[in-house]
Amino acid sequence: MNAQVVVHAGYTLSYNEMHEQANWVAYELTEKETEGKYKRTNKFLVDPDISTGSATSKDYKKSGYDQGHLAPAADMGWSKTAMTESFYYSNMSPQEPSFNRGIWKKLEKQVRGWAIDNNAVYVVTGPVLTDGLPTIGPNKVSVPTYYYKVILDYTLPEIKAIGFIMPNAGSSEPLQSYTVTVDSVEKFTGIDFFYRLPDDQEKIIESIIDVGAWFKE
């Protein structure tokens, strides 16, 4: 996979120059970090750490797509630097407005709730990047057909994981209808997410999904 891994204050990303966006963005979100001391800057910036140059505002201008966050700004309000860096174009992907402001935003809010319920969660999220996607702007930023998110609760007593695959389109379906195993997301994206877990533990966590353990009444 063509990638440059970059570590920012609030998240780490793998940048795909061919598609001019991240293959994945990963971070831990703790209960305390959801408190959000710093407000959104809404100032989109070129990422100075991308050696090949990230996408820019010209790519999105008049494209009809939102500059959709991968690591949400609302997850980065615990630090002024983290909030600023959440608006880097390396953390953006072209999203349908109805998707970005609807079901995707709903999932982001749900993840913050899980961080509170479970003390902390690990999140990996991104676009599904494949050959032949349509592009926007002078840098030819790929427009993904699907997005994914995987969440790991590694806090005892209930270690668990859940995955989501969502089309880049508006939806009124419940979040539960998009749940899949982490294994399924790995097969769909070609990414090995929680490889640092002990092998036997990884195998169980990634192959099983207990929706009721996440979406409690």
Image (tube, helix red, strand yellow):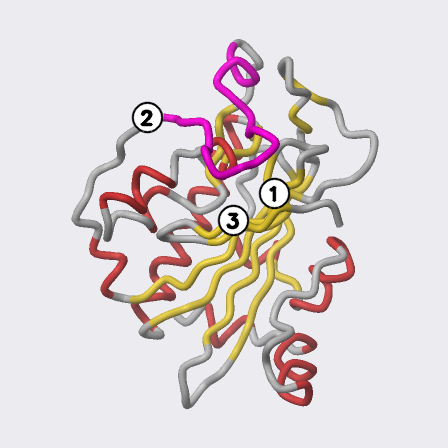
Q: Is residue 97 above or below residue 106?
A: above
Q: Position of residue 23 (x, y in %)?
A: 64, 46
Whether residues under marks 1 and 3 lie with C-beta atoms below 8 angstroms apart, the answer is: yes
How crowded pointer 3 is (Cα within 10 Å; few <14, some 14-19, many 20+) is rated as: some
In percent of width and height, residue 143 lies at: 67, 29
Residue at 70% in and 22% down: 135
- Sequence-wise, the earlier of marks 1 and 3 is 3
**Circle 3/circle 2 CB separation < 8 Å:** no
The tag earlier along the polypeptide, 2 or 1, is 1
Direction from residue 43 to residue 14 in the image, left or right? right
Q: Which residue is mark 3?
A: 6
Alpha-carbon distance for marks 2 and 1? 20 Å
Cα–Cα gap, marks 3 and 2: 20 Å
Q: Is residue 109 visible in this depiction of the protein? A: yes
Q: Amino acid at mark 1?
A: Tyr
> For the residue labelled by badge 1, is the local secondary structure a helix, a strand or a loop?
strand
Mark 3 and mark 2 lie on one chain; the one further toward the N terminus is 3
